[in-house]
Every structure is written in C-alpha cells, then in structure tokens.
Image: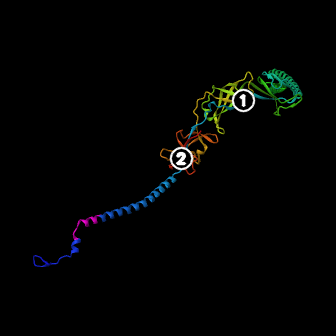
Amino acid sequence: MNSFDRNGTQLMEKPEAVRRFDVQSPAVREHAGRLWIYAIITVIVLGAAALAGLLPRWHRRAALRAETQELSIPTVTVVHAVPGKNVSGIPLPAEVKPLVEAPIYARANGYLRRWMVDLGSQVTNGQTLAEIDIPELTQELARSKAELAQAEAALSLASTTGKRWTELLKTASVSEQEAAEKQADEALKVATVEAARANVRRLEELVSFSRVSAPFAGTITARSTDVGQLVSATSGKELFRLAQIQTLRVYVHAPQTLARSIRPGQIAEVLIPDLPGTSFPAKVVRTAGAIEPETRTLLVELELNNKENQVLAGNFAQVRFKDLKIDAPLTLPSNALLFRAEGSEVGVVGQDGKVELRHVELGRDYGASSEILSGITASDRIIFNPSDSLVNGATVRIAEASKVK
C-alpha cells in the first residue's frame, strides 16, 4: 500500500528484508558480541603463541651475553702471605776457631838440630820449641865482633891524637887545618864504631833465632819439621803451629732478620753434633757491623770458655739465639711474584675486584717461597700465578682463596 507525505508526495515502502536487517534485534546484538569475543580471543592466542616463540630466544640471547661477559673477566686464585718461620730458636751453622793461632817460622838459616815439643804439647810463653844449627851466622858474628874491636882501637888512637893536636894548637906548634883534620878523623872513627856495634847487635839477634821459641802460651797443633831438615828464613815453610784453645772463638753468620737483634754481651747456646744433648754458653763479643751483600748475613763472633777442653778447635758447631724477640717476615710462594723492569711486584685484588700492582722488597729466597720485607700485609689477597700481561686496574674474579703454609 502506497502512502503520501504532507505535501502529497508518494512514499515508497522498503522491502521487508531490508526492514528486518536494519532493525537491531537482541539476537543480532548477541551474535555481534560473540564475534568480537572470538576476535579478541584469537588475537590473544596469536600473541601468546608469538611470545612463546620469542621468549626462549630472548632468554638464550641474554644468557649468551651474560656468559660472554663472564668469560671476558679472568678468573684468578689468590693466596695470603703468612709469617715465615721464626729463626730466633733455630740453630745456625757456626765454625769454632782458637782464640789465638799462629804459624811458627824460622828466622835463621841452618839445619834443625832438635825439637823439644810435639803435637798436643802445652807450652808457655817464651818456651824453646826447637834449636837450629847456624855455623855461618856464628862465624859472621865472630868476625863482626873483631871488626868492632878494630874500630874501637882506631877510635881510641884517633881520640888521643885529636887531644894532642888540640894542645899543640894552643902553642901554635901545628896549624888549625891539621888540628881540624885530626878532630874530623876522630868523628869518623866514632861513626865506624857505631856501625860495627849495630852490625854486631843485628847478628846477635839472628843468632838468638837459632832457638825457636813460643810467642804465647798455648797448644802445639802442628809440627812440620824434623831433625836434620834444612830450614830457611825465606822459604815460607812453617815449623810449628801454635794455638790458644782455652778460650775459643765461634763465628756464625746470622740472617738479616736477626741482625738488628744481636748485641755484644748477649748469651747464646753452642751445640756440638759430637756431643748430643750438651750445650755450651757463649757470649757475643762483636759483630761485623755490616751485612754481607753476597749472603745477606751478619758475621757474629762469640767467645766460648773451653778450660776443660771439651770442644775442639776447628769443629763444626751450631749456635742458637734463644732470647731474641723478633717478628718473622711474611712469605709468599715464588709463583706469586712478577719480575719486571721496575722491580719485583705482586698483584693485589681489592674489594671491588680491581687489581693493584705493588712493589715489594724481597728477603731470603727459599726456592718455593720468598721472604717479603715490605709492600704487603697478611690480609692482602695476592694473585697466584699472575699473567705477564697483568696491569693496574684490571677486573678479575676470585676462584678460590687459600693460605700459604
């Protein structure tokens, strides 16, 4: 059925289907809502699937980056310096020598007539050890004495003549020149007598050397001659060796760590390997006052009372300083040291993992370890087996910390 508007215009009617579509019925609205829900679910599912595929790959890349960064930091093992052995009570090797020891040589040429002492003989100061037959010196001494007598006779005549010419000069019986000549001749004869007397004294001294005597009291420790042997003052061959062994000298090389603690007057113990369980007190009498550059030790001399002759001179001994109070120096494994043009260095790891290269002063070298006199403390973490390319400020990771024993 057609309809008309107010102006009389005929209006066309919409088909029924069109009218049904345009109408928003509840069924249509419900259907559209389901479609939106399906679309959202689909998007979520697709996003989840994409995320599930990308997430493992992202984790693998993150792990790879972390592993690469981890591998770029070197891993090191650190050690701590520990005090070395306290050498205060450790026996040190020593050498025992006589208080006084001297070789006895001949001062006169001749043949050995006899000897009066042998090995182990106790002698006093000035005691005769041997006699030498010196006929040439005896004859020369006799001739020198005759020459002295001749010179003295000539002097007596010259002195008498000089006095007479002096008296004659007063009466002008002789000239002044002649009187002066007589006085000069007397002075010449005086000088000749003095020379002859000096020669006699020299030969008498040489003749006295035919008796070989001891310069001090002691013990004969060697005899290198026999009866009839030709001895010479210029041969340099000793006849006897004399030693004073009632008091002995003990020489010990103390390590540098003990040097400042040893003073004259201190008492130490002397140990003799041949007398186990026995020790002898000895007193420090002097030190060298300087460290030997080759051994880094201080030569110390001690005196040992040996009145009972229990210790033999020349024996090997050990000295123990018991009352010294010193701090033992720190020691490090030798593998922890870096030897560079700047000197000896070690790598110290700080709390932030940064490396600090420190210069250290070395003491004694024990082979597997070395003394460190300065530069580090016991709490420092020292890199063990450091790389030659180690530099200041490098970042490292500590694998394990241990203490050197």
Above or below 15: residue 217: above
x then y, percent, for residue 238: 81, 31
Cβ atoms under marks 2 and 1 closer than 8 Å: no
Q: Position of residue 40 (x, y in %)?
A: 33, 63
**Quadrant where the N terminus is found in the figure:** bottom left
**Quadrant of the image containing the C terminus:** top right
Which residues make up the magenta segment? 22-33
Q: Can residue 179 be seen in this view?
A: no
Give the structural element (helix, strand or loop) at label 2.
strand
Specify few, some or many for label 2: CA neighbours under 10 Å numbering under 14, 14-19, or 20 or more: few
Q: Which of marks 2 and 1 is in front?
A: 2
Q: Which of marks 2 and 1 is nearer the N terminus?
A: 1
Residue drawn 60% across the image and 29% down it = 324
Task: State the residue in front, 347 or 292.
Answer: 347
**Residue 122 painted magenta:** no
The x and y percentages for residue 102 are: 77, 28
Q: In this view, does 40 lie to the left or right of 340?
A: left
Q: Residue at label 2?
A: 399
Amino acid carrying mark 1 in the image = Pro
Residue 300: x and y, percent? 66, 31
Label 1 crowd (10 A; few <14 / some 14-19 / many >=20): few
- How much space separates mark 2 and mark 1, taking CA atoms? 48 Å
Query: Dot 1: what SS?
Result: loop
- Residue ID at (25%, 65%): 29
Is residue 127 visible in the rendered image? The answer is yes
Q: Nearer the viewer, residue 45 or 120?
A: 45
- Amino acid type, callout 2: Ala
Q: In which quarter of the image is residue 302?
A: top right
> How many circles with numbers are drawn on the protein?
2
Q: Name the residue under label 1.
A: 273
Left or right, 93 with respect to 78, comes to right
Circle on res. 215: none
